[in-house]
Amino acid sequence: MDQLRELIDYIARSLVDEPDDVRVDAIDGERAVILELTVAPSDLGKVIGKDGRTARAMRTLLAATSARMRRRAVLEILE
């Protein structure tokens, strides 16, 4: 689970202008791990991307990584 959190943390910090404001919280549920990503309000658009493409790409990478670990992971981007 820490690998998934570190992956999202690394990607998000690479995208934003204020990497110190990036926070990833992992919530372990029965069926899946929920990763909650919080960034500075000014960086929210950079994490989501045009038409949600960046967020979709992050979710795709997360799904591929979690599948190798035989887990299911969900990324939620919080405002």
Image: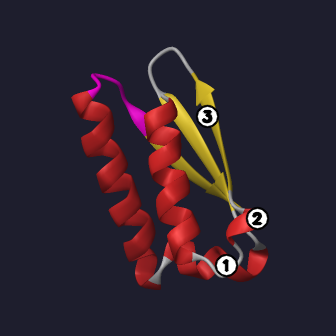
Foreground tag (2 vs 1): 2
Q: Residues within 10 Å of mark 2 (few under 14, many from 20)?
A: few
- Above or below, 10 against 45 in this view is above
Q: Amino acid at mark 3?
A: Ala
- The numbered mark, 2 or 1, whose residue comes first in the sequence reads 2
Q: Is residue 39 left or right of residue 32?
A: right
Residue 53, horizontal then vertical, whole percent: 37, 75
Q: Nearer the viewer, residue 8 or 75?
A: 8
Closer to the observer: label 3 or label 2?
2
Where 15 sits versus 35, above or below? below
Numbered circle sitting on residue 43:
1
Task: Say whether marks 2 and 1 touch (CB < 8 Å).
Answer: yes
* N-terminal-most mark, 1 or 3: 3
In the image, which disc is placed on residue 18? none
In x, y percent, where is residue 73?
A: 42, 35
Image disc number at residue 26:
3
Magenta span of residues? 69-73
Percent x, y for residue 38?
A: 70, 58
Number of marks in the rendered image: 3
Q: Quadrant of the C terminus?
A: bottom right
Q: Position of residue 44 (x, y in %)?
A: 65, 75
Q: Amino acid at mark 2?
A: Asp
Residue density around tag 1, few if under 14, some if 14–19, many if 20 or more, within 10 Å: some
What secondary structure is the stretch in magenta mostly built from? loop
Mark 2 lies on residue:
21
